[in-house]
Image (cartoon, rainbow, N blue to C red):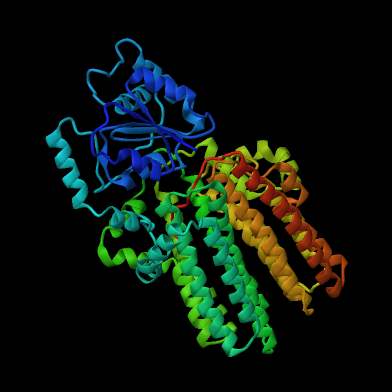
C-alpha cells in the first residue's frame, strides 16, 4: 500500500486524511521535517510515497492527479509531492537537504512539501506538475485564506471536471460528438464497479469478434447485427481510454492491448465480411486484403513521419504554419479531422454500409475513402518535409531503421554498399525503395504465375532495399522508406496470391499479411513506449521484409498454385506463432517489472 506522510500541524475539521485514505494511501502523521524523514525511510521501498501538507485545501481530483498518476516517477501539486519507487532516492535526498541546517528554501516557502519540490527542481529532477485547470490545490497561510480556498472548492464541480478530462482532448468528429457525450458515463459506471481499462478493452475485442462472426453468416440479419455490434465495440473502445483517464489506471500493457486490439478488431471484421460475401457467392478477399494493406501503409506513414520529426531541431516550415492556422479556424478543424478518416469515422462508415449494402460496396467505399485520406495526409507531410529545415537526430534515424524491418540479406548487402551510398544524393533512399518495390510488384502483376521474372525482381528488390538503408535515414524524405517497404511486401503477397487463381490462396495471403503487419505494429508500439525495437533474432528469424518477399517469389516460381496456397498458409502460421509468442512474452514481462505506464493521447488512429 502506498504511504502518505501528513506534515505540519493538523487543522480541525480538515478532510485531507480521509481523502488520502480514499485514494488508497496508508496515512502517517509527522510533526516536522525530522519526523517526516524518519517516516520516509520506514516507508516500503517498493511502493509510492507522498508528502502532503496537513493544511492542504483542494479538490479530491486534484490530489488524485497529483499523487496517483502512474506515468510519472515524480509529481507535485501545491502542498503535495510524490515519488514512485524509481524516484525514491531523489525524494530522500531532497528531504535530507530540507532537514539539514538552513534547509535551502525554508525561509522562502512555508510548506515542507513545497520545499521538497523546490529542492527536487534544484537537483534537476523531472517533476511532473499536472494541469489542474479550474481545480483548486492550495496551502492557505491563515484562516481567511483557508475560508476563501474552501469557497473556491465549493464553486467548482470536481466530478464534472473529472468527467470532462476523461475525454481525449483531440479526437475525430464522430467520437467527439456521437460517442464521447455518453461513453464517459459508461467509463464512470465501470470505475465505480472496479472494472479496469484492460477488461473493457477485452470486452471491446470480444464484441468486435462477435460482429465479425455475424458478418460471416452472409445474411442480411447477420450484416445488420454486425454493424450494430461494431458500433458497440467502438463505444467500448472509447470507454477504455476514458476509464483510464477517469481513474488514472494507465499501464504499458494497457496501452499495448488498446492499440493492438484496435487493429485485430478491424482486420478480423474485414475477414468476416469476406467470409460472408463468399457465402453469397461473391469473392471479395482481394478487396479485404487490399483494404488491410492500404490501412496498414497509412499507419506506417503516420508512424514514420512522427518518429522522423520526434526530436528534430529547427523544425519549422510554411506548410506546418498554414496547417496550424487552419486548425484555429472553427469549421476547418473538423473538416480536416474527418478527411483523414480516423477510426470513429471509418468504423461508422463500415458499420452503416455493412447493415445497408453488400460487403463489396463496403470495401469499395473503404478503399476509396482510405486512398483519398492517405493521399491527403502523405502529400501534406511530403510538403512539410521539403519546406522545413530540420536536423534529424541519431535517435530518429535509429527508429526509422527499426521501422524499415531489414533482414539479414539487406543488412549484409548494405555493409558492402555503405561507402557508395555516402556519395549519392539525399533523395536516394526513398527513391530506390520506391523503384525497387514498384519493380517487384509490377513484375508479379504483369507476368504469368510460375514464371521466373518475379524472382529476378525480388533479387533486385533485395539490393535496392540494402542501398536504401546503407546510410543513416536522416534525409528530408527518408521517413518514406518504411512505408515503401511495407507496400512492396504486402502488395507482392496480394498480387501473387491473386495470380495463383486457386480457391483459398487469397485468404491464406490475408493471414500472412495480418501476421507480418502485427509484427510491424508491435515494433511501433515498442518504440513509442521507449522499449526499443524487437530483438534482432526475431527479425532475422522471420527474414525481414526483403527476405520474406524473396521467399514468396521463390515459392511462386517453384510450386504449383495449389502448393503455393498451402505454403502461404504454413508461412502465415509460422510467422504468427513466432511474433505473437515473443510479443506477448515481452509485454507481460515489461508489465510485471513495472515498466513506465504510458497512454496514447495522440492523433486518432
199 relative to 55, above or below = below
Residue depicted at 52% across the width and 47% down the height: 251
Provide residue 588's location: percent of width, then percent of height.
Answer: 64, 47
Residue depicted at 54% across the width and 59% down the height: 299
Residue 321 makes an appearance in the image: yes
Residue depicted at 66% across the width and 66% down the height: 491
| Horizontal arrangement in the rendering, residue 19 relative to residue 256 (left or right) | left
Residue at far front of view: 12
Total numbered labels placed on residues in the image: 0
Using the rendered view, name the quadrant where residue 116 is placed. top left
Residue depicted at 43% across the width and 24% down the height: 39
Provide residue 582's location: percent of width, then percent of height.
Answer: 71, 49
Using the rendered view, name the quadrant where residue 329 is placed. bottom left
Using the rendered view, name the quadrant where residue 577 is placed. bottom right
| Horizontal arrangement in the rendering, residue 570 relative to residue 163 (left or right) | right
Q: Nearer the viewer, residue 359 or 335?
A: 359
334 relative to 260, above or below = below
Residue 287 makes an appearance in the image: no
Q: Nearer the viewer, residue 541 or 475?
A: 541
Provide residue 100's location: percent of width, then percent of height.
Answer: 35, 12
407 relative to 566, above or below = above
Residue at far left of view: 144
Amino acid at each position: 500500500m502506498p504511504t502518505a506522510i501528513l506534515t505540519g500541524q493538523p487543522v480541525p475539521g480538515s478532510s485531507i486524511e480521509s481523502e488520502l485514505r480514499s485514494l488508497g494511501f496508508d496515512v502517517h502523521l509527522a510533526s516536522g521535517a525530522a519526523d517526516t524523514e524518519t517516516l520516509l525511510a520506514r516507508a516500503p521501498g517498493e511502493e509510492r510515497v507522498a508528502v502532503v501538507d496537513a493544511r492542504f485545501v483542494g479538490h479530491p481530483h486534484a490530489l488524485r492527479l497529483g499523487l496517483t498518476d502512474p506515468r510519472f516517477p515524480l509529481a507535485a501539486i501545491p502542498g503535495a509531492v510524490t515519488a514512485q519507487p524509481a524516484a525514491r532516492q531523489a525524494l530522500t535526498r531532497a528531504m535530507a537537504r530540507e532537514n539539514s541546517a538552513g534547509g535551502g528554501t525554508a525561509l522562502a516557502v512555508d510548506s515542507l512539501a513545497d520545499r521538497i519540490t523546490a529542492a527536487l527542481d534544484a537537483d534537476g529532477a523531472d517533476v511532473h506538475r499536472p494541469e489542474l485547470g479550474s481545480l483548486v490545490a492550495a496551502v492557505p497561510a491563515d484562516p481567511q485564506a483557508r475560508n476563501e480556498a474552501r469557497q473556491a472548492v465549493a464553486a467548482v464541480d470536481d466530478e464534472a471536471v473529472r468527467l470532462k478530462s476523461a475525454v481525449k482532448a483531440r479526437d475525430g468528429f464522430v467520437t467527439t460528438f456521437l460517442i464521447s457525450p455518453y461513453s464517459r458515463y459508461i467509463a464512470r459506471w465501470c470505475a465505480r464497479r472496479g472494472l479496469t481499462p484492460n477488461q473493457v478493452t477485452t470486452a471491446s475485442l470480444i464484441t468486435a469478434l462477435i460482429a465479425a462472426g455475424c458478418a460471416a453468416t452472409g445474411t442480411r440479419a447477420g450484416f445488420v447485427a454486425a454493424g450494430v455490434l461494431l458500433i458497440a465495440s467502438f463505444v467500448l473502445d472509447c470507454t477504455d481510454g476514458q476509464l483510464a483517464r477517469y481513474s488514472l489506471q494507465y499501464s504499458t500493457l494497457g496501452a499495448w492491448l488498446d492499440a493492438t486490439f484496435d487493429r485485430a478488431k478491424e482486420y478480423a471484421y474485414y475477414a468476416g465480411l469476406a467470409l460472408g460475401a463468399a457465402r453469397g457467392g461473391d469473392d471479395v478477399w482481394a478487396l479485404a486484403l487490399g483494404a488491410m494493406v492500404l490501412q496498414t501503409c497509412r499507419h506506417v506513414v503516420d508512424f514514420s513521419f512522427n518518429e522522423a520529426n520526434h526530436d528534430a531541431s529547427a523544425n519549422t516550415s510554411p506548410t506546418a504554419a498554414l496547417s496550424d492556422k487552419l486548425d484555429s479556424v472553427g469549421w476547418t478543424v473538423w473538416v480536416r479531422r474527418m478527411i483523414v478518416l480516423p477510426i470513429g469515422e471509418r468504423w461508422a462508415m463500415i458499420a452503416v454500409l455493412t447493415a445497408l449494402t453488400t460487403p463489396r460496396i463496403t470495401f469499395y467505399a473503404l478503399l476509396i475513402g482510405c486512398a483519398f485520406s492517405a493521399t491527403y495526409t502523405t502529400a501534406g507531410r511530403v510538403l512539410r518535409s521539403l519546406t522545413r529545415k530540420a536536423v534529424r537526430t541519431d535517435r530518429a534515424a535509429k527508429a526509422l531503421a527499426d521501422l524499415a524491418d531489414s533482414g539479414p540479406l539487406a543488412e549484409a548487402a548494405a555493409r558492402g554498399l555503405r561507402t557508395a551510398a555516402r556519395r549519392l544524393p539525399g533523395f536516394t533512399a526513398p527513391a530506390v525503395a520506391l523503384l525497387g518495390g514498384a519493380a517487384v510488384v509490377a513484375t508479379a502483376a504483369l507476368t504469368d504465375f510460375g514464371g521466373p521474372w518475379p524472382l529476378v525482381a525480388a533479387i533486385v528488390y533485395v539490393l535496392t532495399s540494402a542501398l536504401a538503408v546503407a546510410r543513416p535515414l536522416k534525409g528530408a524524405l527518408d521517413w518514406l522508406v518504411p512505408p515503401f517497404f511495407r507496400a512492396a511486401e504486402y502488395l507482392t503477397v496480394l498480387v501473387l496470391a491473386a495470380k495463383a487463381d486457386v480457391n483459398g490462396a487469397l485468404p491464406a495471403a490475408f493471414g500472412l499479411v495480418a501476421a507480418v503487419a502485427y509484427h510491424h505494429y508491435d515494433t511501433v508500439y515498442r518504440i513509442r513506449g521507449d522499449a526499443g525495437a524487437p530483438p534482432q533474432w526475431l527479425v532475422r528469424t522471420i527474414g525481414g521484409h526483403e527476405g520474406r518477399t524473396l521467399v514468396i517469389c521463390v515459392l511462386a516460381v517453384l510450386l504449383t498454385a495449389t502448393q503455393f496456397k498451402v505454403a502461404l498458409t504454413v508461412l502465415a502460421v509460422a510467422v504468427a506463432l513466432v511474433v505473437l509468442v515473443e510479443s506477448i512474452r515481452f509485454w507481460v514481462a515489461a508489465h510485471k517489472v513495472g515498466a513506465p505506464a504510458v497512454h496514447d493521447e495522440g492523433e486518432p488512429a
